[in-house]
Amino acid sequence: MSALLTVSDVHIAYGKVEAVRGVSLDVASNEIVTIIGANGAGKTTLLNAVMGILPLKGRTTFAGIDLAPLDIEDRVATGLSLVPEHRELFGTMNVEDNLELGAFRIARATAATSLERVYALFPRLKERRKQLAGTLSGGEQQMLAMGRALMGAPKLLMLDEPSLGLAPIIVADIFRIVTELRTAGVSVLLVEQNAQAALQIADRAYVMELGEFVLSGTAKEIASNKRVAASYLGFQHEGESAI
Amino acid sequence: MNTTIMLFLLQDGITNGAIYALLGLALVLVFAVTRVILIPQGEFVTYGALSYAMLATGQVPGTAQLAVAMGLVAFALDLFFARKALHARLVMRSAALNIVFPVALLGLTYALVGPNTPIAVNIALALLIVAAIGLFLYRIAFQPIAHTSVLVLLIASVGCHLALQGLGLVFFGAEGLRGPALSNAAVTAGPLRFTGQSLAVYGLTVAFIVALWLFFGYTKTGKALRATAVNRLGARLVGIRTTLSGQIAFLLASVIGALSGILIVPITTLYYDTGFLIGLKGFIAAIIGGLVSYPLTAVAAILVGIVEAFSSFYASNFKEVIVFFLILPVLVLRSLAAPQVEEEKD
């Protein structure tokens, strides 16, 4: 498997405060990689910087292309896509318009088949296609944000906290769809606080604490790591304290 | 007051209101997409009107040369900002838009200008010249500072207004100009007489509003512009270039401004600085519409036109005072409602 996204020794600062320090990661084709960590660890900052929303120091390449000189729009054109934490939908436009705009850079004929694929993945969106995006429930908005990103036929989808604030049944649905994406040839970089759910579907995982990766490995290894189990999965091994 | 006078005043008010509606819609569009309060909208009106009037007398207006000069600056800026990743396609594209287009337009103007040039050709030339100026104005003055606050953009906007107004004095002189009417036909209905010109104002206003509605509702570019207005980051994340959206918004605004000018210059004498006051009345309508609502802006513009017509009949000295006074109760009402508006946004 060749590396699709590589991030090497990346530093990201808000003014003088360094939020991410010397982080390196890679995502291969057809792989689900997750970054888990507590609130404020720097996960969202890292995704936003890879997408070009925030400036970073270090080297990032995607599909062999150096990302440094590219704007957000150019990064989208290379097949990189971000579903941000706040979803950033077009609230006063309807579901179908949101999805069609997701295929802004794609030829009309290809967009039509993408639309059918997205509706097949998220039947709920088809039912609501004339409803304004701003009036959807939280789960539906998350589905729409993912659907909109998929309309652009990305090679790598970066999901920022897709489960945040959603009911467990909807979270399960969304994670099921993430695994289906891998089957369809889309790689996923998943940032999650819900470590248990993320580790269940991921191939590999990184654990982020205070702006640094403290652990990395296959999802199974990480899930069976005692420290991770105690801090992020909410159960303790015998004879261990929680922290 | 008898009914006849009232009907006359209403007719007059609606004709002016239609123009204000066009300008107000352009202001709302530009603000929604770029957050720029487009003070130079009035200059687009003047430039369109006076370029058309000069072309009708067989002269080449200075605006045609201005477009070439601004194009050169825009080209230089394009090269400067892309200096790290310069490639041939980008240079060719920028040269075609910023140099070839305005130079060709200037050449075309020299070739076609004359005392017997058809009105339609003069209108097309005036519209194209002002469209080019609008496009380059965005590239030069606003695109490099697109990420700054509304206040910074407003200050830049005032600067552009002053610069363009000064240039207007150079190009057109201090004397006012009038242009030839689009049509000399007239229709009489009861006591009212509709000139061909006022019918053209109604017709073109309605046509433009319908065209804008179709553009924003049904085309990919129109939807992308709306998306940029609703959520800039969201738009960038699907690959919509906010600079392109800004350029299109300015292009539409300059064409709307120039068209408004061309429509009124046969009715009233325009001076190099008249556009500002006309633009301000469009601005009042846009403010009443909260700088977001297109239908509310259009209705408010008609109201502004009617209030203006009646106040010029009853108290012509206070005509402008009364019109601009309209903005006060609206601002008070809006400020009372403001906390709720902010809640809705989140």
Image (cartoon, coloured by chain):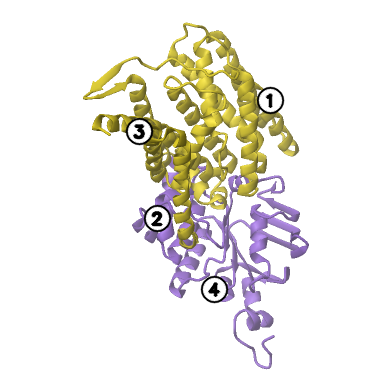
Chain colours: A purple, B yellow
Decide: marks 3, 4 in contact (CB < 8 A)?
no
- Report x, y in % for residue B197: 36, 21
- Report x, y in % for residue B245: 54, 40
Chain bearing tag 2 is A
Report how far apart the C-alphas of labels 3 and 2 lie in the structure. 34 Å
CA neighbours of label 4 inside 10 A, class few (<14), some (14 to 19), many (20+): some
Report how far apart the C-alphas of labels 4 and 1 lie in the structure. 57 Å
Give the image quarter of residue B250: top right
**Amino acid residing under circle 1:** Leu
Report how far apart the C-alphas of labels 3 and 4 lie in the structure. 63 Å
**Amino acid residing under circle 2:** Leu
Tell me the quarter of the image containing the C terminus of chain A.
bottom right
- Residue at point 41% right, 54% down? A95
Residue B93 visible to the viewer:
no
User: Would you say B311 lies left or right of A87 here?
Assistant: left
Q: Earlier in the sequence, mark 2 or mark 4?
A: 2
- Of tags 3 and 2, the one toward the viewer is 3
User: Would you say B273 lies left or right of B10 here?
Assistant: right
CA neighbours of label 2 inside 10 A, class few (<14), some (14 to 19), many (20+): some
Mark number displayed over residue A197: 4
**A141 lies above or below B307:** below
Residue at which label 1 appears: B72
Q: Earlier in the sequence, mark 1 or mark 3?
A: 3
